[in-house]
Amino acid sequence: MGNTEKVMFAASDTSSCKQLEEIGTAATSMVLTPTADIVHEWYPNQPYLYPLQHMDPHSRYEVRVSYPATTPTDIEVELVCARDSNLVYGVLFKQTYAGVTNRVGMENPNVPVHIVMEPLILGIVHTGIRNVALMIVFALGLGTCVIYPYVSSLLQIDKKQD
């Protein structure tokens, strides 16, 4: 996938949401949950609403939509809230084909998309990075506590022999 649009939000921050009643007609698609990974195809110029479920009210999340650069599309991402809820209800995607074609019937092609919802650690870091960070800390600890002293002792032995 070549292009990506994203929105980061706190589950309980409804101040920047569009109200569910205001969005009109939108195709309600699959439900997004933390760690969701959805591959879908959108029909041209149709808004899609993805309801959010199983969110922790005290957490922050990121929703990303990726789509191929070969399908030039402008995608607008908006958060949607319901009046009777203190959590974000869903994510609304509006897309418009932005290319020009000379092929008949291809004026508005379907757009293949890849949608991911991830919880953020400390509000900024993806949970998927946690394992990489732990491996880096482990490698640094191993190098500092085991490898460095061993190499230093070998060098000290070589100096004493000279």
Image: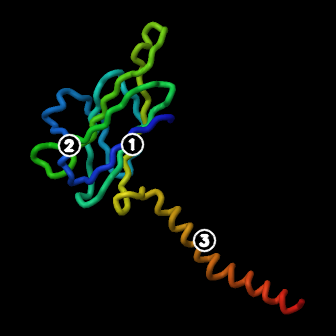
Q: Classify residue 73 by image quadrant.
A: top left
Q: Amino acid at mark 3?
A: Ala
Alpha carbon of mark 2 to alpha carbon of mark 3: how far? 43 Å
Query: Which residue is found at the position 33% from the left and 49% from the top?
Result: 8
Label 2 vs 3, first from the N-terminus: 2
* In front of the other: 77 or 55: 77
Query: Which residue is found at the position 35% from the left and 49% from the top?
Result: 62
State which quarter of the image contains the C terminus: bottom right
In this figure, which residue is indicated by the disc labeled 3?
139
Q: Amino acid at mark 2?
A: Cys
Res 64 label: 1
Q: Residues within 10 Å of mark 2 (few under 14, many from 20)?
A: some
* In front of the other: 76 or 116: 76
SS for tag 1? Answer: strand
SS for tag 2? Answer: loop
Q: Position of residue 56 (x, y in %)?
A: 26, 58
Q: Position of residue 28 (x, y in %)?
A: 26, 33
Is residue 92 shown left or right of residue 146? left
Q: Is residue 42 above or below residue 77?
A: above
Total marks shown come to 3
Label 1 vs 3, first from the N-terminus: 1
Res 17 label: 2
